[in-house]
Amino acid sequence: MSIYEIYWITRNWSIRRNKDENFIYITPYLDEVQRIKNSCNRHFVEPKECKKDKIYSKSKSLKELMVLSSDIATTHSLFKLVDEEAEKIIEASSYTLILDEVMDVVQHIPVNKADLDLLFVRSDTLRKEPDGLITLGDDAERYMSFGRGKFSELINMAKLKRLFMIDDTVLLWEFPIDIFRYFKEVYILTYLFDGQIQKYFFDFYDVNYNKYTVKKSDKYELITYNENSDLEKRKDIGKLINIYEGKLNEIGRYNTALSYNWFRNEPETMIEILSNNMYNYFRHINDVRVNDVLWTCYKESGVKVKNTRELLFLTI
């Protein structure tokens, strides 16, 4: 199995290239699911949901689609719910996984001490095994029979064998590593992979992966990632960056300046000063016209800054 790190790629490059394979495309966003369904020259389908029990009925729909060898597009959140039955289906199939951005393969589950005592000591709802794995106790099924309650999600995590306890106080959810091994190939579309948890997750479980980047000539192609080549690109980009340190930037001299709370709490006069400083920098120091300027800030604050200088700046 190979895991590919891709620094920039057209999102459906591999999908278009392979006409006779089956794909599961996993993305963080529902909008991206729709884009894949609409733009690819393959018939991608999305797991159906039921109004009564959306999450777990979609899990069942996902398995049904895999049995039919359908090309599937869905979200990270649903993919995290794959169970042992789904794992067996993937193992028996020849799916290629395209993972748009890395997953939260390990997550801390915040549970206070009183609730831990209730679940593990005062009732037999959850049990801790010697290796730290959390399993279901005799009271778990009775608890779930009353419908969805406060601890339903924890119980379902334990049922899927995804929940672990450390030092009797910390609960961790972990994605099953074997799922990645069951796919024919796995592509991960991301950047800065070496600094992400999923990279260390693979290293811990001895999953081999190769890093690639995309080269554009007459067409897009994957080439072996070269760190030195990437450094050269950064140097070229660095030459285009100019950091202004003059008087107009003094509004940002405090550690919390231009933070979310700064924009929310500062009086309108400070927002006006910021807007005027931006205008002076672009218009008088650099002689830049409005259509050549892009600037960013927090969405709800952008209107405030823009309104002090009507339409002088473009927000993105």
Image (spheres, rainbow, N blue to C red):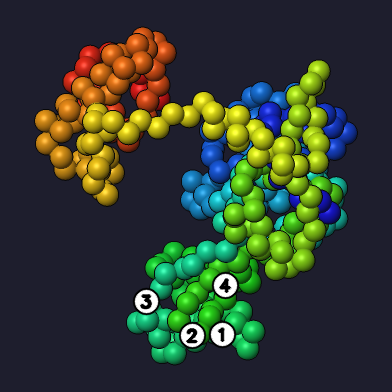
The numbered mark, 3 or 2, whose residue comes first in the sequence reads 3
The numbered mark, 1 or 3, whose residue comes first in the sequence reads 3
Question: How far apart are the two marked residues, 1 and 2, measured between alpha carbons?
Answer: 9 Å
Pointer 3: what residue? 112
Residue positioned 88% across, 33% down in the render? 20
The mark lying in front, picked from 1 and 2, is 2
**Would residue 240 be found to the left or right of residue 6 on screen?**
left
Question: How far apart are the two marked residues, 1 and 3, measured between alpha carbons?
Answer: 16 Å
Q: Amino acid at mark 2?
A: Asp
Are the residues tagged 4 and 3 within 8 Å (C-beta)? no
The part of the image, by quadrant, that contains residue 65 is: top right
Question: How far apart are the two marked residues, 4 and 2, measured between alpha carbons?
Answer: 13 Å
Are the residues tagged 4 and 2 within 8 Å (C-beta)? no
Q: Amino acid at mark 4?
A: Leu
- The image position of residue 200, as x and y in percent, is 65, 62
Question: How far apart are the two marked residues, 4 and 3, measured between alpha carbons?
Answer: 16 Å
Residue 154 can be seen in this image: yes
- The image position of residue 184, as x and y in percent, is 84, 49
Q: Amino acid at mark 3?
A: Asn
Residue positioned 80% across, 35% down in the render? 222
Pointer 1: what residue? 128
Element class at badge 2: loop
Are the residues tagged 1 and 2 within 8 Å (C-beta)? yes
The numbered mark, 4 or 3, whose residue comes first in the sequence reads 3
- The image position of residue 97, as x and y in percent, is 74, 46
Q: Residues within 10 Å of mark 4 (few under 14, many from 20)?
A: many
Pointer 2: what residue? 168
Element class at badge 1: strand
